[in-house]
């Protein structure tokens, strides 16, 4: 039985190799796509998202000041805040499921933020998803803006400023290692400053500025080896592979339609080969060609652009799941049109929509909120997630289960639908 399946699959692969245009767009176009966009994105350091930047915020201070600062972030139109603990935030961002970055407010943040004019230096730890560097740069600017605004509010709060001056005077009186001349100068200056603040109109205080209220420390997103891409090519090659997979799917789906319209399938059906083996041979040819294309692109990326996958075993598993998914989809798409022109147009229309909403054209992170939500129905998204998880996101076997299970499940579903709706003749 399997011998005849292999023969039929070999026939389809040989036909593809003889078609120079089809061979080029199947194997080399996705390679050009991935290389071209990898070189473009390698120089991007800033940009603007089309929707609010999603961030995971961790409040390790849990003070009135830190909660007030988080409230300001939540009220900002540029940010979408998700409150988490440190472990969950770091893991979510590393896996690409927790937004563009995590922001951690450390201990004593509230006190230090209120005392920036008296030596306070609130620190913030920021971990940015390596695939979303443009949003990360914007986030750091937004945090600096909110921190400065917080410092200005403290300056305008006369009661708060008076209290901080009193605390500074108490600490100064108890300190024994301060130079006596400096201590005497400060003990004369601070009461004068308090009197100045209490008697100066608020609108005049509002003109005082120039402080640098915080130090924002960027943290690496990593686990085990790196958990982050070594270059932009590790991000763009999964997208290039997705386009190659779509090309294989469309090419083999159209070949089935051509064989049906030419009567080839009817003649094959009259042989002892059997219905299931005929379709299995076609799907095996699609599977082998798609897998070969993926391996070719990955080898090219490793040799030329020094892409180093985190797990070769999981990468092979992800590639296999992608091939299963789109081989089943190929059979279903071949049933959507009676003529070659209709089937080809419908197939590419469906595949392009899958690419558009699944991150094949525009990364999902730059899409509006409603499109991010519906992108989960696209097999292209799950294929990219699986490949990224094995190449640079450093997914564990458990984390890879969901995208791989979805891809295989979608492949089986479309195979079943294709078998029910397949027609052997026009």
Image (spheres, grey):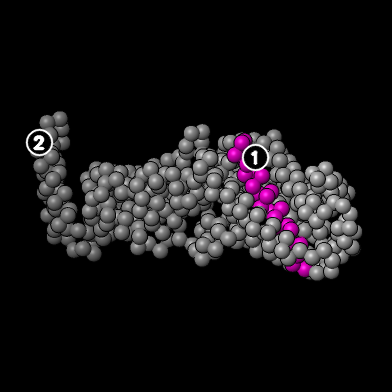
Q: Earlier in the sequence, mark 2 or mark 1?
A: 2
Label 2 crowding class (10 Å Cα cut-off): few <14, some 14-19, many 20+? few
Q: Nearer the viewer, residue 139 or 128?
A: 128
Residue 243 placement (x, y as % from top left): 69, 53
What kind of secondary structure does the magenta stretch mostly adopt? helix
Task: Using the image, determine if residue 335 lies above or below residue 29.
Answer: below
Residue 80 placement (x, y as % from top left): 41, 59
Residue positioned most to the top: 177
Q: Residue at x 64, y 40 (%)?
A: 316
Q: Residue at x 50, y 49 (%)?
A: 96
Residue to which mark 1 is pinned: 316
Q: Which residues are magenta?
A: 312-337
The Cα–Cα distance between marks 2 and 1, rounded to whole angstroms, is 67 Å
Mark 2 or 1, closer to the camera: 1
Residue to which mark 2 is pinned: 174
User: Could you say whether the residue bearing mark 2 is in a helix, strand or loop?
Assistant: helix
């Amino acid at each position: 039985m399997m011998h005849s399946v292999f023969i039929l699959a070999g026939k389809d692969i040989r036909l593809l190799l003889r078609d120079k245009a089809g061979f080029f767009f199947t194997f080399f176009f996705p390679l050009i796509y991935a290389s071209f966009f990898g070189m473009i994105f390698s120089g991007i350091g800033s940009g603007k998202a089309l929707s609010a930047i999603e961030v995971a915020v961790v409040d390790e201070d849990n003070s009135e000041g830190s909660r007030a600062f988080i409230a300001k972030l939540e009220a900002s139109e540029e940010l979408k805040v998700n409150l988490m603990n440190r472990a969950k935030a770091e893991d979510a961002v590393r896996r690409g499921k927790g937004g563009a970055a995590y922001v951690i407010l450390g201990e004593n943040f509230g006190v230090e933020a209120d005392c920036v004019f008296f030596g306070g230096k609130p620190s913030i730890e920021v971990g940015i998803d390596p695939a979303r560097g443009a949003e990360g740069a914007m986030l750091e600017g937004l945090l600096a803006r909110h921190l400065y605004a917080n410092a200005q509010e403290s300056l305008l709060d006369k009661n708060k400023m008076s209290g901080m001056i009193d605390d500074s005077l108490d600490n100064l009186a108890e300190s024994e290692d301060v130079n006596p001349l400096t201590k005497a100068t400060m003990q004369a200056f601070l009461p004068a400053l308090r009197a100045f603040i209490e008697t100066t109109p608020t609108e005049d205080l509002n003109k005082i500025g120039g402080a640098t209220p915080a130090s924002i420390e960027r943290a690496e997103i990593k686990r085990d080896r790196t958990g982050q891409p070594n270059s932009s090519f590790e991000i763009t090659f999964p997208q290039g592979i997705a386009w190659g997979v779509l090309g294989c799917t469309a090419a083999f789906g159209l070949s089935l339609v051509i064989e049906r319209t030419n009567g080839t399938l009817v003649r094959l059906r009259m042989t002892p080969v059997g219905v299931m083996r005929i379709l299995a041979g076609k799907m095996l040819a699609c599977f082998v060609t798609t897998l070969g294309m993926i391996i070719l692109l990955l080898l090219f990326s490793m040799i030329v652009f020094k892409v180093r996958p985190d797990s070769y075993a999981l990468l092979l598993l992800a590639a296999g799941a992608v091939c299963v998914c789109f081989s089943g989809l190929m059979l279903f798409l071949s049933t959507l049109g009676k003529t070659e022109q209709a089937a080809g147009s419908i197939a590419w229309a469906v595949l392009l929509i899958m690419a558009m909403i699944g991150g094949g054209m525009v990364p999902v992170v730059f899409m509006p909120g409603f499109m991010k939500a519906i992108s989960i129905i696209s097999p292209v998204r799950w294929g990219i997630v699986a490949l990224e998880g094995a190449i640079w996101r450093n997914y564990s076997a458990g984390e890879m289960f969901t995208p791989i299970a979805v891809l295989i499940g979608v492949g089986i579903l479309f195979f079943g639908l294709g078998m029910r709706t397949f027609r052997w003749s026009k």
